[in-house]
Image (cartoon, grey):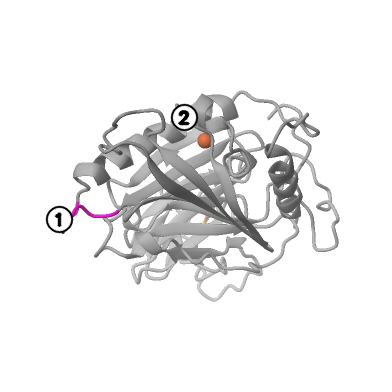
Amino acid sequence: MRDWPYEVFPTGWYQIGYSAELQPGEVRPVRYFDRELVLFRTEAGRLALLDAYCPHLGAHLGYGGTVVDDCIECPFHGWRWRTDGSLGTIPYDPEANRRVRIESWPTREVAGLLLTWYDAFGREPFWEWPGITEFLDEENFYPIFPQGADHIGIRKIIPQSPVENTPDFEHFPFVHGAGRAGNPITWEEKEHYLRTRISFLFGAHKAKTWLTPDGPVEGEIETEAWGLGLSNARFTLGDFVTSQLTATTPVDAEHSELFDTITASREPGDSGPEPTGKAGKMITFQKGQIRHDFKIWENQRYVEHPPFAGREAEAYASFRRWSKQFYFGPDGESAPGAGGGQQAG
Ligand code: FES
Ligand SMILES: [Fe+2]
């Protein structure tokens, strides 16, 4: 983003795919955080993310590498690497003990999502992502996979932008066609976690809409953010709940891969796998809504000291203060040798 002041990618957990899309034995080349990486799952089901290049002669393990037992075998000369990046075996010199290893990245699988951890200061994960309650509750909500798993792909968007919607009560009418702005109720910060609630009049100024057939309904939007990589919006209208997780994973300093994962309350009596009725409509509608934000995020420049008006001033100031923690080290320092968004170490 033009005028963006920080040189490192923010610290935190980031989505790198869906559990259901990486089967045992699968190998995939991926690129995040300005690094070439290889993602794979062992036959026993273990997930691994390693730097892509084989230390021997530099082959990219993501192109032709294969899973053999609990290792990935290099396509060039068959050296085998374990999920922690250590050397398994060299097929033509089994006695050799080379002190080489590949950098391995922390991974997790939570609520159907594959995650990795990034920290420019080299710290191990110091929080865990709890997941989204609705994604795990298939009795009351539709499964997220496949209909609720939206691969948005790579966009010119940085992780800060989607989460900066949190303090932005005034953009709803302009960007999302809402009849009214939202009204803040709660603002709670706890270290890497931020939760807010706003009240929202769904279907404002309209006699009826598909979502509000009996006229406007006072509902609520609850947002939760865990760092800047993962943020959820929970829309509640009476007993109808929709949960939408936006995941923004940096690819390079300007681009991220976005995943949008969404589910909604089951239609009464429907236990099938596919969202139907109001839930199906809401999921389609919300997939469209997030895309309305893109044209703003992809083209805006960063304004460090905005001339605020009205209620946004306080909320934005709080948000900017909270979000700063993800760009600095434990003692408030910038990353050693920060520049171009490279990970230290
Ligand atoms: S480059 Fe990987 S085994 Fe030779
Ligand atoms: Fe928005």
Q: Earlier in the sequence, mark 1 or mark 2?
A: 2
Q: Main secondary structure of the magenta part?
A: loop
Of 208 and 303, the residue lying toward us: 208
* Amino acid type shown at disc 2: His
Q: Is mark 2 within 8 Å of ligand 2?
A: yes
Secondary structure beneath dot 1 equals: loop
What residue is pinned by disc 2?
176
Instruction: Please state the horizontal and vertical placement of residue 242, each as a whole percent of the image.
Output: 36, 50
What residue is pinned by disc 1?
270
Q: Considering only vertical position in the picture, is 294 above or below 279?
A: above
Of 243 and 332, the residue lying toward us: 243
Q: CA distance from mark 1 to mark 2?
A: 30 Å
Whether residue 230 is visible: yes
* Amino acid type shown at disc 1: Asp
Instruction: Please state the horizontal and vertical placement of residue 62, each as a whole percent of the image.
Output: 46, 49
Instruction: Please state the horizontal and vertical placement of residue 122, each as a whole percent of the image.
Output: 72, 61
Q: Bounds of the magenta span? A: 265-273
Q: Considering only vertical position in the picture, is 20 above or below 162?
A: below
Q: Residues within 10 Å of mark 1 (few under 14, many from 20)?
A: some
Q: Residue at x 38, y 37 (%)?
A: 287
Q: Residues within 10 Å of mark 2 (few under 14, many from 20)?
A: some
Instruction: Please state the horizontal and vertical placement of residue 249, each as a whole percent of the image.
Output: 55, 46
In the rendered image, the quadrant that contains the N terminus is top right
Instruction: Mark 1 and mark 2 in contact? Answer it, CB < 8 Å.
Output: no
Quarter of image, res 167: top right
Whether residue 232 is visible: no
Of 106 and 189, the residue lying toward us: 189
Q: Is residue 250 left or right of residue 141?
A: right
In the rendered image, the quadrant that contains the C terminus is bottom right
Q: Residue at x 36, y 68 (%)?
A: 45
Q: How many marks?
A: 2
